[in-house]
């Protein structure tokens, strides 16, 4: 069965960096685009970034553009989010999610359990 | 301020029907599919509707989706207490090249 397991969340000071990982299993990872979505405490979903199946295309939300980098390693079935210059408003649960084949609007069909990032001094 | 607009809350009694609206623009809903997600308290979101009106396997036909122009609607019939959750619409914005979600709608079963 499809599984997505995030890790790497922790408490970090403002301005510091953190790398999140998402380990995928149960499907052919290299065939799917992958997304990061976050949710601040008590708030709604915010789309963060997407990487295409072959890693050639990457897109970012305005609030993280230039600070976050999405990447993937298909040999390890792993998705990453490198987060630099962290700010208090980056505090959230970060989910990785699988994009359905066909296009970026085709839906996110599997989600991980999320990993909590807290940015605080 | 979310790109897609949803009502903050809706409510209805068990067994009744409810609809949740999602309003966008020509660059997002108007030119792309819409998805709907259910988020039960303390859990990750779950895909309910994809490609605007299709249900993944395992999602009961009490849940339905539709799209017209720059708006989409999620319908839920035969409401159950277990349907109490937050519901989000989502799509792609072709002009901005970003994913977008609505602000979420909290469904309360009276």
Image (cartoon, rainbow, N blue to C red):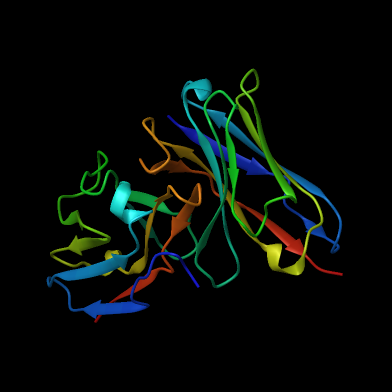
- Report x, y in % for residue A101: 38, 30
**Residue B81 appears in which quarter of the rendering?**
bottom left
- Report x, y in % for residue A22: 62, 37
Q: Residue furthest top?
A: A75
Q: Residue furthest bottom?
A: B110
Q: Quadrant of the N terminus of chain A?
A: top left
Q: Residue at x 47, y 68 (%)?
A: B2
Q: Residue at x 44, y 59 (%)?
A: B101
Looking at the rendered structure, the number of numbered marks drawn on it comes to 0
Viewer-proximal residue, A57 or A16? Answer: A57
B109 horizontally vs B89: left or right? left
B57 horizontally vs A84: left or right? left
- Above/below status of A1 relative to A60: above
- Report x, y in % for residue B80: 21, 67
- Above/below status of A1 relative to A99: above
Q: Quadrant of the C terminus of chain A?
A: bottom right
- Report x, y in % for residue B30: 29, 54
B103 horizontally vs B81: left or right? right
Q: Residue at x 36, y 71 (%)?
A: B105
């Amino acid at each position: 069965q499809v599984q997505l397991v995030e890790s790497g969340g922790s408490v970090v000071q403002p301005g510091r960096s953190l790398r999140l990982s998402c380990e995928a299993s149960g499907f052919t990872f290299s065939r799917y685009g992958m997304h990061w979505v976050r949710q601040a405490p008590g708030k709604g979903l915010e789309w963060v970034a997407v990487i295409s199946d072959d890693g050639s295309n990457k897109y970012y939300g305005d609030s993280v553009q230039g600070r976050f980098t999405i990447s993937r390693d298909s040999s390890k079935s792993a998705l990453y989010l490198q987060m630099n210059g962290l700010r208090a408003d980056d505090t959230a649960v970060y989910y990785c999610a699988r994009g359905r084949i066909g296009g970026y609007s085709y839906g996110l069909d599997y989600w991980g359990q999320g990993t909590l990032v807290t940015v605080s001094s | 301020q979310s790109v897609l607009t949803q009502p903050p809350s809706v409510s209805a009694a068990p067994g009744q029907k409810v609809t949740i609206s999602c309003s966008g623009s020509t660059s997002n809903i108007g030119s792309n599919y819409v998805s709907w997600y259910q988020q039960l308290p303390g859990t990750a979101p779950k895909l309910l509707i994809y490609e605007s009106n299709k249900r993944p396997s395992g999602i009961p036909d009490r849940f339905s989706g539709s799209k017209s122009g720059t708006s989409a609607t999620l319908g839920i019939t035969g409401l159950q207490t277990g349907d109490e959750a937050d519901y989000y619409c989502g799509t792609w914005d072709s002009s901005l090249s970003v994913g977008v979600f609505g602000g979420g709608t909290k469904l309360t079963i009276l």
